[in-house]
Amino acid sequence: MTAAAALAPSPPATGGPDPRPGSFGAFVARCAAAGQLVVQPRMGFADPERMRDGLRRTKAAAATAAGTLTIDSYTRVGDRAAARAALAEGAPLNGYPIAAHPAARTRALLAGVADAGFPVQVRHGSARPEAIIRALTAAGLDATEGGPVSYCLPYDRTPLAESVAHWARGCELLATLAPAPRTAHLETFGGCMLGQLAPPGLLVALSLLEGLFFVRHGIRSVSLSYAQQTHPGQDAEALRALRRLAEEFLPAGVDRHLVLYTYMGVYPRTAHGATRLLEDSARLAVRAGAERLIVKTAAEAHRIPTVQENVRALETAAAAAARTTPEQADGGDSEVYQEARRFVEAVLDLGDDLGRALRTAFARGLLDVPYCLHPDNAGRSRSFLDPGGRLRWSDTGAMPVAPYATSSRRTPLTADGLLGALLTTSSRYDSDPPAPEGADMEHTPPPLGTHLASPTLRSAMLVQQEALYAVREFLRGQGFTELLPPLVGPVTDPGGRGAKALDVDYYGQPYKLMTSAILYKQASLRGFPKLFYIAPNVRVEPPETAGTGRHLVEFHQIDVELAGASREDAQAVAAGLLTHVVEHVWSAVPEVLRELGREEMDFAELLSGGKFDSCTHAEAVARLAGHGHTQSPDAEIDWAGEKVLSLAADRPFFIDDYPKGSRGFYDREDPERPGVLRNFDLIAHGGYGELASGSEREADYAALVTRMRESGENPAKYAWYLELAREGIASSAGFGMGLQRLVRFLTGLDALWQVSAYPKLPGVIAP
Amino acid sequence: MRRRSLDILLAGTASDSHTWNLVYLQLFLEERGHRVGNLGPCVPDPLLVRECAARRPQLLVLASVNGHGYRDGLGAVRALRRAGHTLPVVIGGKLGTAGEADPAQRALLLEAGCDRVFDDGDTHALGAYLDTLAAVETRAAA
Ligand code: B12
């Protein structure tokens, strides 16, 4: 498949008809069709400003994300007076009090943030949801979460019968207040319940039954939830069982998808434990085919997370998801499926009124949530973790399923025993040593000594050394001469994205360390019409790029320039170079690559020969819009967008024609199309993003001065370069390819620091 | 020194729906020989006051982990004291949203008539407090 074909919008992969384009369900369906897991935070703050900032930063995260308004506990229990009073006191709340703020305030906080490419869902936990539904629809939203059982038993002391009645009204209210062309969307919470120690069969059944309840009360777009439990195999069975049951029991005309919750029980306390559990959930979601994931942050065990912590969790989950491939498997007659089906049938057998059937099922103990204190729950069921780590029944009370272990003499539950069971997962993740690098994505490198001794770094350096060999072999073969570039100069290329050059004191003058050496390359054409550098570069990237895995302060660049060349000539060299390097590393160090988890198959399309595809910047922006990602038409493609495009492709491709203003003055403007630059980026496939940036260069003195002025640069600073330009600089085209980005692509490692012997992360003071 | 078993009433605070801590605390208290009435989560102030009047417990344990504990606890203690209940009242869990104890908020609770604030969620400290309380009760009863 070509990159262009891969990027074309395709029909939704999930069941049911295409819901309205602007809706929550449609967004998830579009992302699923593009192979993108939607990630979403559990974020909520009392202050509208902070809430808005949180949504904006969710939207800007390097992830395919949806937004969340998590509602505070006062609003959940219907105590609007307390919510208002707490706001007035300035007391910190555990969520956004949507019903205490006027609708106009919520609308204002959403304005310009929520849109078709970034839908926002309201998550609460109220057995009486009407006020919240009125508030969210008044604010222009139409997606929320709930359930007659799951927003009652774990959350409230409201009798189940009342919750069922409230939720029947709530569904109808939502469908009515978000009329066509809007599409009301409702997610079940039944796949979570108390968060821990409920065997998956029961959770799957409750999630399905609540979805069916929503549909019977007029909702046409639903998501069915399931919360990660204790065993990845059992969890995958549960998600597949849920999908199969949805096909069997939900009417065909209903839009639906599956949503996984990252572990909802007692969470690991350490950062590494928290991160690894999150990553495992992202992998589970992709493997078993959930379309959306609600993440947990590293602050979960401690306090309400900050915006930054939420964004980090989203990006970590997205990165783990991007490295995982879906597994083909049928819904199977797994143990979870069979158990869930037995629950579902037992409830549906109780009559056509599903609300009444659910109440009866709980009253008779046919459904019985272990350890649930709610008076309408029988409280006779108990569960345990089997030696293999699966969650199973020890007591089933009156439920229509059999206990797994019929231990004759059950040891009575003790406080320590309960705590032990609740803490099993968190203890496991907290106590395991952090995963060796490469096996898992960690955001920051270990201490330098440990890093330098790691086998992963050693493998990466073996690949790098072969890549460098191949670069030189290829370019020399094409008649290029290698020069050693300058390190310090009066000016260097102006950086984008808030990156700065590093100033040094040079005999009392402020000089710069090179951030790339385009101006010097142009100057050198006089004696060397085909030249290249392999040069260290220093770029003081802003600290917020530390967690992207894509930015280093110190890096190396393969810089190529050829006189008299066009953009297409430069692209041919870049494509040839990349192809040669890939061929070489696979013949020189195949076993090293395989050990790192790479497969030759990953490069099959690249090595199949033929020109790389290209699209224009404008086309890329349009395609991103098709994927539900908003990208400014006047700027560089942002990382998240670049990643979307990269993931959608199966071989590298070029993006041409960036708008003027998004790049430096040295990229030549197209004489026929003012405002459009004769430049390009080379994007790797598989989510690795940009590998190289290049262009035809501006060489005309007058044009250079004008362009400098336009971009706010002071021409006086560039005196030596302009002097040469006045004398005449050859026309040329060239590119810079980041060496660490290249090696990361070759090795399939997650973060640039893993392929750098001496990693310097943005904002991190390190040796 | 003989220890007497106490009648303890256990309750989640008005806005807090978490129950695992209540299940745990009930077992914890029972294992120390006390009788526990568990009111469950989200107990509004009027219900709490009514239950204290009806059951006449010797200790009220309020538990909160949802981040509204300081505020809800203050409301509960004030309501109880206003209604003339003099029984010992303690509160514990994760009382704020910041992940650390807030001395000013804790002082407000104590001032309002709360006997102990375990805002670090320390159940050992609760155990030690129970021991002193049970011992005092023995003496008082002697
Ligand atoms: C399971 C869980 C849920 C389940 C609860 C189901 C249920 N019915 O219990 C569900 C998913 C429904 C849920 C919902 C919510 N949750 Co919750 N939940 C958790 C979670 C993951 C585990 C809690 C747990 O079960 N612990 C096991 C028990 C045994 O331990 P514990 O509660 O921590 O209590 C220990 C100590 O604190 C102490 N302790 C507790 N009470 C008392 C009382 C006394 C007197 C003493 C001495 C000690 C003590 O003893 C216990 C044993 O050591 C925690 C995060 C975590 N810890 O990983 C969040 C957490 C408690 N939840 C939180 C929040 C905010 C909510 C929500 C408000 C949703 C939201 N806005 O995010 C809603 C609650 C709505 C409401 N009306 O209150 C926050 C609280 C934030 C804070 N305090 O700063 C936490 C910390 C998550 C987070 N970081 O955001 N939650």
Image: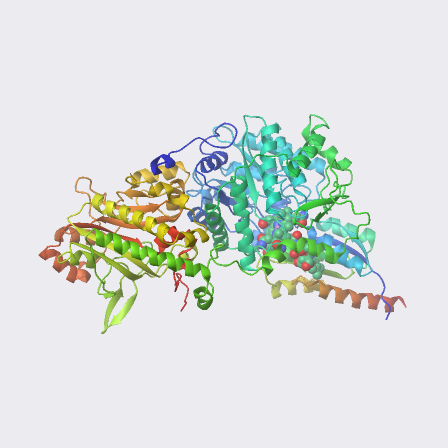
Can you tell which quarter of the image residue A755 is in? Answer: bottom left
- The outermost residue toward the right is B142
Image color mode: rainbow
Count of picture labels:
0
User: Is residue A619 shown left or right of residue A687?
Assistant: left
Location of residue A501 in the rendering, given as x and y in whole percent from the top left corner: 29, 62
Task: Quadrant for the C terminus of chain A, please.
Answer: bottom left
> At which x and y percent is residue A62?
42, 49
In the image shown, does A448 or A225 lie closer to the viewer?
A: A448
Q: Does B103 appear above or below B66?
A: below
Residue nearer the viewer, A140 or A695 = A695
Quick check: A767 left or right of A510?
A: right
Quarter holding the N terminus of chain A? top left
Residue A705: quadrant of the picture? bottom left
Image quarter for residue A490? bottom left
x then y, percent, for residue A646: 38, 44
Q: Residue pushed farthest bottom?
A: A507
Does the rendering let one see residue B74? no
- The answer to whether any part of residue A138 appears in the image is yes
In the foreground, A604 or B50: A604
Q: Is residue A657 left or right of residue A146?
A: left
